[in-house]
Image (cartoon, rainbow, N blue to C red):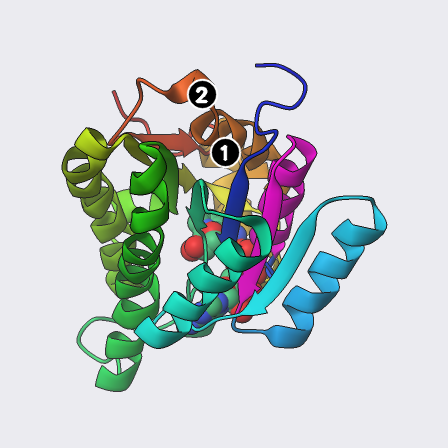
Amino acid sequence: MGAEPLKGKVAIVTGAAGGIGRAYARGLAGAGASVVLADLNADGVRAAAEELERDGYDVASVQVDVSDEASVAEMAGSAADRFGSVDILVNNAALMAEIMGQTLTTIPMDTWHRTLAVNLTGPLLCARAVVPYMAEKGYGKIINQSSGGAFLPSAHYGITKLGVVSMTMSLAKELAPRGIRVNAIAPGWVNTEAGLATTPPEVRAALAVSIPIPFGDPEDLVGGLVFLASAASDWVTGHTLNIDGGWIPRT
Ligand SMILES: NC(=O)c1ccc[n+]([C@@H]2O[C@H](COP(=O)([O-])OP(=O)(O)OC[C@H]3O[C@@H](n4cnc5c(N)ncnc54)[C@H](O)[C@@H]3O)[C@@H](O)[C@H]2O)c1
């Protein structure tokens, strides 16, 4: 990969006010892309974009609710209006810390429905909204954020994240004829406020002795993201890339 493998490309990152989303937006901008930072948290995403702008990057911000089809259509339209098209979508927004501590037999049904709406329907709505722009060019990259939690019992959260893996395979097959690649990243335990910071100390201690490289920072995910967003991965599709310090052993 060259120094700016994404030069001339336009990317949307959802959940870009959060710990990982901010790092993803910076990583794509650093690789040369124009980036639209999108999040439900309007103040947070504006601040994240302003920070990148101050550093000289070509970015914009937009408020979006990924579970709302009209809001998602507006996000895609505003990205195309501002930067001319959409080449890369990073489906990173999700509910995580705020929905933990529930079991499948006791979870309030409105929490269940909201989790599915944001974590599973959200990525699908965003993909559907950007596909026309990508199909027009016969080229595009969609990267869905899964989790190592997809492969362990993780209740409603894990169910949505395993659903993301399955959606990635189906979209990859469906969109290949239009030149669109669809892959996923399954991170391990990442140092963000919503992630590791809210993990109880005893759980943290157990993880520290059982995982080869137990904890990572958002920046540790960026190399994999840029690979999946760039031409270097043009023959990769339907794949879920574990970036997790060896947490989930998979062949
Ligand atoms: N932190 C970890 O350890 C870890 C591990 C594996 C996977 N992940 C995944 O990485 C992603 C980001 O995690 P994070 O730690 O940065 O979490 P975070 O909570 O900091 O970021 C999530 C962002 O999504 C936004 N969001 C929530 N609902 C939304 C909606 N309806 N529409 C638009 N935006 C919405 C939030 O406002 C927030 O800014 C998530 O998909 C998460 O499941 C995180």
Among the 4 quarters of the image, the one containing residue 110? bottom left
User: Which residue is painted at 38% across and 71% down in the image?
Assistant: 101
Residue 21 counted in the magenta span = yes
Residue 5 appears in the figure: yes
Which quarter of the image is occupied by the N terminus? top right
Mark 2 Cα-neighbour bin, 10 Å: few <14, some 14–19, many ≥20:
some
- Residue drawn at the location 31% of the way across and 52% of the way down: 127
If you read the primary sequence from the N terminus, does the residue marked by circle 2 or circle 1 appear first? 1
Note whether residue 196 is visible: no
Q: Quick check: 233 left or right of 108? A: right
Can you tell which quarter of the image residue 106 is in? Answer: bottom left
Query: Under tag 1, what secondary structure?
Result: helix
Q: Position of residue 25 (x, y in %)?
A: 61, 47
- Residue 231's tag is 2
Q: Are marks 2 and 1 in contact (CB under 8 Å)?
A: no
* Residue type beneath disc 1: Leu
Is label 2 in a helix, a strand or a loop?
A: helix
Instruction: Give the vertical position of 16 relative to 148 (above or below).
Output: below
- Under mark 2, the amino acid is Ala
Q: Is residue 179 magenta?
A: no
The residue that label 1 is drawn on is 225
Give left or right: position of 124 versus 52: left
Which numbered dot is residue 160? Answer: none
Start and end of the magenta stretch?
19-39
